[in-house]
Image (cartoon, rainbow, N blue to C red):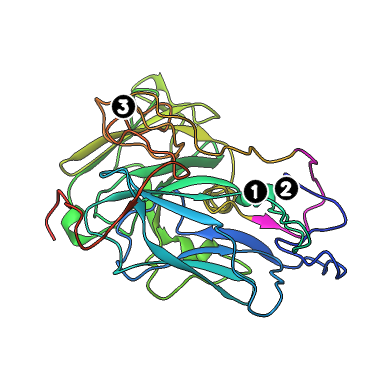
Amino acid sequence: MRLLKSGACAAFLVLAACPPPTPTGDAYIAPLNGQSAISPEMDLVVHTWSVELPPEYPLPTLMRVVDLETGGLVAGDISKRGNTLRFTPTGGWRPNRRFAWTVNPIEDIPHGPETLVEGNLVGTAVFDTSDTLNILGATSSSPSEICLIMSRPLLNEDGGDVRVTVNDVELDNDTTTFLLTTDAEYNTGFETDPVDAGVHVFCITEIPQERDGEAITVTAGSVVRVWWGEGGPWRQEVQTISVADKLGELRRLGNADDEEQDDTEPDPDPVPADTGGTDPVDTGTSEPEPADTSTGTDPDTGSTDPDTATETDPDTADSGAPE
């Protein structure tokens, strides 16, 4: 795992007058980028190696959240508990919505605490409060296996026939094996909130090398399409990394023990400008075709820069969706 900032001050927020603490453990965000079925009571979480501020010192505006339906900023409070910073929305999350949230770099204040934001935590992610089902990534650690990161736990209502193609060759369900696990089985070094339902990982194993004379090649860049009951097809390109590494990528996971580091400064403007109807936020999700999702973007949301959006009153905003 690469860290985009290194040096003597490895802490997230440190006092200039105090020696920086030694980083330990993991730094990550929750929910995962692209996660759906988010509970109305779930906080947005940024966990880092160290958060040290003077008593009663105001917390920086580290997180900004935009309702992608209204384009307005979501009102809420930022709180600190140990090395964890949380954003709690006023009145909870509105149902059946997609939100974008940004972890911002922080400008230093003259004579105030020195602030450093680890590069892996900076940027924009999305989440949904609806039960929409997407695929966040496809990984493979061997030519006979593909694992799909779902955007939420699978439900009984998701039942139905499963069809999977690899480079347009359909897999035979009678000769392959399906395994279903949760992301919690891959989490090490940290715990998620009880209201965070996480996601499911759906693995297809014992994939043969050919079917009816057509080669089945599972390698980096192989195109996987999935139909699930009445849903799909979802399209993803295979990454030859482990499930744990892909989940870490979606959590922006950074570990203090990682040796490979980069002194590159984080992008000071993590949310690109509106491109006229195409969401430039890279969610990593794959939504059902025929929409082109090869870039991992959602063509239906549009985009709003959290730094320029106006704050929306959750009690008066028109939801546009059932309450």
Q: In this orientation, does residue 203 appear?
A: no
Q: Quadrant of the C terminus?
A: bottom left
Determine whether 276 is above or below 296 in the image. Answer: above
Q: Position of residue 106 (x, y in %)?
A: 65, 52
Q: Which residue lies furthest to the front in this view?
A: 110
Q: Where is residue 97 in the image (x, y as percent from the top left)?
A: 26, 51
Q: Do the residues labelled 2 and 1 touch (CB within 8 Å)?
A: yes
For the residue marked with disc 1, what is the amino acid? Asn
- Residue marked by disc 2: 3
Judge depth for marks 3 and 1 and give the one in front.
3
Q: Give the camera-side residue of 251 and 277.
A: 277
- Residue marked by disc 1: 120
Q: Give the camera-side residue of 267 and 282.
A: 267
For the residue marked with disc 2, what is the amino acid? Leu
Say which residue appears at 71% left-offset and 63% top-offset. Answer: 13
Say which residue appears at 33% left-offset and 61% top-offset. Answer: 38
Q: Reading the chain from its start, which is encountered first: label 2 or label 3? A: 2
- Residue marked by disc 3: 277
Query: Is 261 situated left or right of 174 in this image?
Result: right
Disc 2 crowd, CA 10 A, few/some/many (<14, 14-19, 20+): many
Say which residue appears at 37% left-offset and 43% top-offset. Answer: 135
For residue 317: magenta? no
Determine whether 100 is above or below 313 in the image. Answer: above
Q: Position of residue 93 (x, y in %)?
A: 30, 62
